[in-house]
Amino acid sequence: MERGVRKAFWHLGLKYVPLFHITVDKRSDKPPQIKLPKKFLKDDIVFIVDDVISTGKTMDIALQEILKRGEPTIIVIVLIVSPLIYDLFIKYPSIRVVCIDFDPLVDEKGFLVPGLGDNDKMIFGALEENRLER
C-alpha cells in the first residue's frame, strides 16, 4: 500500500517523498520501532499510511510520536476503519482521515470482525523481526 501511495505522489510531480517508519508489534512487549525526523515544521504535511484502524492503538502511538516532534498537518490514508476511529478524532481533532471503507463490526477487544486487520499478513507475509519493510 505504501508503494502505491508513493507512486501516486510521484505521478503528481513529487519526485522525492521522504519515508519514515513507526512499527508497533501489539503481540509483544517490545517498544515501537521509530524512524522519524527529530523535528517537524508547522508547514510540513505528514501522510500516515496504514491498512486498517481497528482499535486505534497503533495509530495513537504514531500520532503521539509525530506530535512530540512538532505540529505538522497530518493526513491518514487507510483502507478500513472501525467505529473506534471516533476516539482518535476526539483526541486529535486536527487529523484528517481518508479511508476506503467503514466496518462497523468489532469484537469485545475492539478488533474488526471477521479479522480484516490480519489480511496484510496473508498478502505480504508476517513482519520479520529487525526489518521494517515487508
Image (cartoon, rainbow, N blue to C red):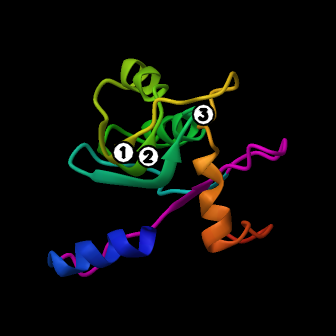
Between discs 1 and 3, the one toward the N terminus = 3
Q: The N terminus lies in which quarter of the figure?
A: bottom left
Q: Answer yes or no: do the residues labelled 1 and 2 have beta carbons within 8 Å? A: yes
Q: Is residue 48 above or below residue 128?
A: above
37 relative position to 96: left or right: right
Which residue is drawn at the image coordinates 20% and 48% (left, top)?
A: 43
The residues colored magenta run: 14-32
User: Mark 1 or mark 3: which is in front?
Assistant: 1
Q: Amino acid at mark 1?
A: Asp
Q: Which residue has dot 3 on it?
A: 57
23 in magenta: yes
Q: Which residue has dot 2 on it?
A: 80
Tell me the element at label 1. Answer: strand
35 in magenta: no
Q: Which residue has dot 1 on it?
A: 101
Q: Quadrant of residue 35?
A: bottom right
Q: Amino acid at mark 2?
A: Ile
Where residue 16 sits: x, y (%)?
29, 78
Q: Is residue 52 above or below residue 104?
A: below
